[in-house]
Image (spheres, rainbow, N blue to C red):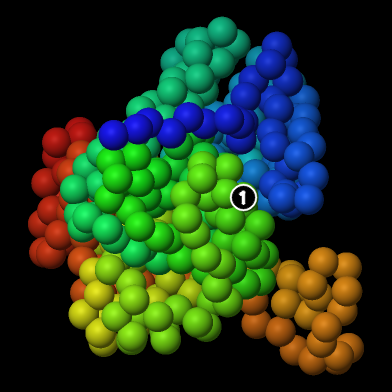
Amino acid sequence: MMQLQETFKALEMKGDELVLIDQRLLPACEQDFICRSCEDVFHAIRDMVVRGAPAIGGVAGYGVWFAARQARGDMDLFDRLCAHLVDARPTAVNLEWAVRRVSAVARATSMDLDAIRREADRIVEEDIAMNHRIGEIGSRIVPPGATILTHCNTGALATCGWGTALGVIKTAYGQGKVAHVYADETRPRLQGARLTAWELVKAGIPATLIPDSAAATLIRDGRIDCVILGADRITADGDVANKLGTFALSVICRRYGVPFYSAAPTTTIDFDTPHGSMIPIEERDGSEVTHIGDVRVAPEGIGVYNPSFDVTPHENITGIITECGILEEPYDVAIADLRKRLGR
Ligand code: MRU
């Protein structure tokens, strides 16, 4: 049994500055992006300097602290800054959840900046602890000698530390259970090729990068023991919004009887939204599809459809791995029980 050590932090407060690894530049360049205002945090989220639902929640907490500092007691301005922050990206529920949680403390303490900052710190600390627990719990479903396929990036870069689905993979690898990982490149922003591959190589886990469309062949040919990936929002019936391509993977896994797991902290559950069809799906700029880097690969004048996420119906999901245990069918009952337990 060996415990892998993290060698980087995706987000960290240093004095009054929020220091982020600029994920747009990885793996070519490891450069910091510094946030000194609520607007900087908004841009970091919208432009995907930082991405991944729990990491977005973590930085949003500090965004509220910056907003409180900037507002200097002007509650209208504070509310406007917080609402603007929530608009940065619509799908990951952790963003709105974190802004609500920290702004409630701001109001309850009459804008005590120290108390607000402590609450933002707590979100980060709790997320790291939840991820280690998700890793422990999730590793139980990984068979010995497993070959696992994952999608997008769900590691330490996508969270406040350790990771969700990639956290499960790292924990199971530390237990000697993982033989190999296949990482989807994850078109069009290449979170798999750029970020998951970077994390896997850093962790020394044997891994192979594949074009997204190669996954079907690997699954059909019996070369994948299970798929584990993340979530951006889980509705009360267990539907999961996650990076575009997740739904297709779930259909292929169901067709060939391969276990398909989503791993996420309970902060990613949107208890108030009944079905996946009600999740707002972000559509991003067409240039993400027409261009690779700065190079145009599609002709001028072509139309583009670029949804950043899709929704996987709960019936395609073998289990949802959370820090409170693995949720299974019937998901509506399991999630309602969990809500009671959490008092949310
Ligand atoms: O557009 P992104 O890179 O923010 O999308 C990220 C994902 O879809 C992840 O799977 C999800 O946020 C979980 S990260 C632990």
Q: Secondary structure at mark 1?
A: helix
**Residue found 83% across the figure and 83% down from its top:** 297
Q: Residue at x 45, y 79 (%)?
A: 215
Disc 1 marks which residue?
Answer: 198
Nearer the observer, 203 or 109: 203
* Nearer-the-camera pick, 294 or 257: 257
Image position of 317 with respect to 124: above or below: below
Does residue 139 sit above or below 39 in this rendering? below
Q: Quadrant of the N terminus?
A: top left
Judge left or right: residue 301 versus residue 279.
Answer: right
Q: In the rendered image, is residue 188 in sight?
A: yes
Could you tell me the amino acid type at mark 1? Trp
Q: Is residue 289 left or right of residue 63?
A: right
Horizontally, residue 268 falls left or right of residue 70, namely: left
Where residue 323 sits, quadrant-wise, is top left
**Which residue appears at 53% of the width and 50% of the height?**
200
172 relative to 165 in the view: left or right = left
What is the x, y in percent for residue 179? 35, 57
Estimate how packed mark 1 is, as few (under 14), some (14 to 19) or many (20 or more) residues with alpha carbons within 10 Å: some
